Amino acid sequence: MATRIALVIGVKGLNSKKSKETSLHAIHVASGGRMVPFGGWDMPLQYLDGIIAEVNAVRNASGIFDVSHMGRIEFEGSGAEKFLSSIISANVPALKIGRSKYNFICNATGGIIDDAMLYRTGEQHYLLVINAANFDADMNWINTHYYDQSDVNMRVVTDDTVMIAIQGPKAVETVDSLTHGKASKIRRFRIGSAEFNGVTVTLARTGYTGEDGFEIIVPSYKGAELWSKLRESGSVEAGLGARDVLRLEAGLPLHGNDLSTDTNPFEAGLGRFAYFEAPNYIPGYALRHLSATKPSRKLVGFKMIGRGIPRRGLNIFADGAKPADESKSVGIVTSGTYSPTVDGGIGMGYVDQIYSVIATKLMIDVRGRLVEAQVVDMPFYKST
């Protein structure tokens, strides 16, 4: 019997308010996409063949995702470098043109408002990509400190563009065929441009699946044409469900689950992305203090040994614990799913520091039944 995957998205991800639609919405509906509200947008959770088929397509060939809901903000001007250095945890002056940097938007106490990608696209030009569910919170933080507009221009381009991710072993080859061989000349974690049917498109060789590929930004009116071309080239349409499984297999955190304003980069094991030396960096003092303090808990990855699928919010207990005593929990699951690639249950969670050592046995409370798990190195899957 085929294994089914149920996607459990954090409360911040799903909402009941009227959702916006990307320029590809009609295509998703026509393709049988199961649409759900996510981060303020109506997005495809999965298509007709299901989440597992979509995951397998990405791992073995290529899949395409509509990620147009992600916020895209351009910063330009002589003051852009200084301003960005004040609000994100990246060494902005050291970022060369055409390079990217994963970073955090932290509040004054070091809590993670969001995680983001920064791309330097020109001498005084940057692109910041943020999570859809955190767009309002991010913009509130940015606007609070965006008080001098004389030397930096900020422009939100989310609604003017479509962003399509193509991921998998055949992704580069596919995009190469549509850009006259230009795509493959862009190296991993870099950004460039190419021509697609008469327009210039932005190609970021990044992603959220653990596979090689691109996140392609095109004018909104060209989005449907690009999506159709990628689909005609053999790429499989994939939704939020597959994206969540793929990112978890790759050991990549999700804000709202594994990261939040109640967590900081060091307990999440991501301190290497928390640059705090810029003299004007607002959370610098807090992050400097946190970096010198051993966290009481740590985000770990674990594999299920017993039968059971971990889900967000489940309690974690020490090996040998008795069931149903919540007060003796040593941690909590922040993400979990069945992985078709690993063929078993995998998850992430925060546990007391003493239980974070690799190979430590844990017990996950799955519907009142304690199921054995083991702390493992992440990622759970790494492409060859």
Image (cartoon, rainbow, N blue to C red):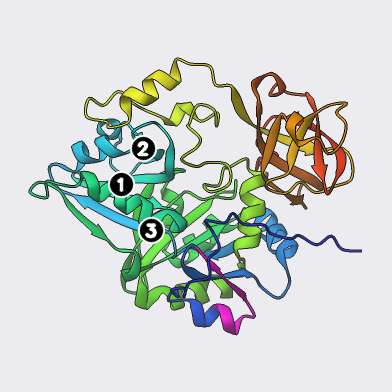
Residue 258: % across, % down? 58, 42
Q: Nearer the viewer, residue 143 or 241?
A: 143
Q: Nearer the viewer, residue 246 or 63?
A: 246
Asked if residue 54 is positioned above or below residue 291 in the image, the reply reads: below
Q: Which mark is residue 2?
A: none
Q: Earlier in the sequence, mark 1 or mark 2?
A: 2
Task: Find residue 314 and report its image quarter.
Answer: top right
- The residue sitting at 23% across, 47% down in the picture is 144
Q: Earlier in the sequence, mark 2 or mark 3?
A: 3
- The residue sitting at 47% across, 27% down in the picture is 271
Question: Mark 1 and mark 2: span between their CA atoms?
Answer: 8 Å
Find numbered disc 3 in the image and state the secondary structure of the residue it sits on: strand
Q: Which mark is residue 107?
A: 2
- The residue sitting at 35% across, 44% down in the picture is 118
Which quadrant would the C terminus be assigned to in this image? top right
Find numbered disc 2 in the image and state the secondary structure of the residue it sits on: loop
Asked if residue 42 is positioned above or below residue 211 in the image, the reply reads: below
- The residue sitting at 59% across, 54% down in the picture is 10
| Magenta stretch, residue numbers | 28-38
3 or 1: mark nearer the eye = 1
Task: Find residue 278 and report its image quarter.
Answer: top left
Which residue is label 1 attached to?
Answer: 141
Which residue is label 3 attached to?
Answer: 71
Crowding near pointer 1: few (<14 within 10 Å), some, many (20+)?
Answer: some
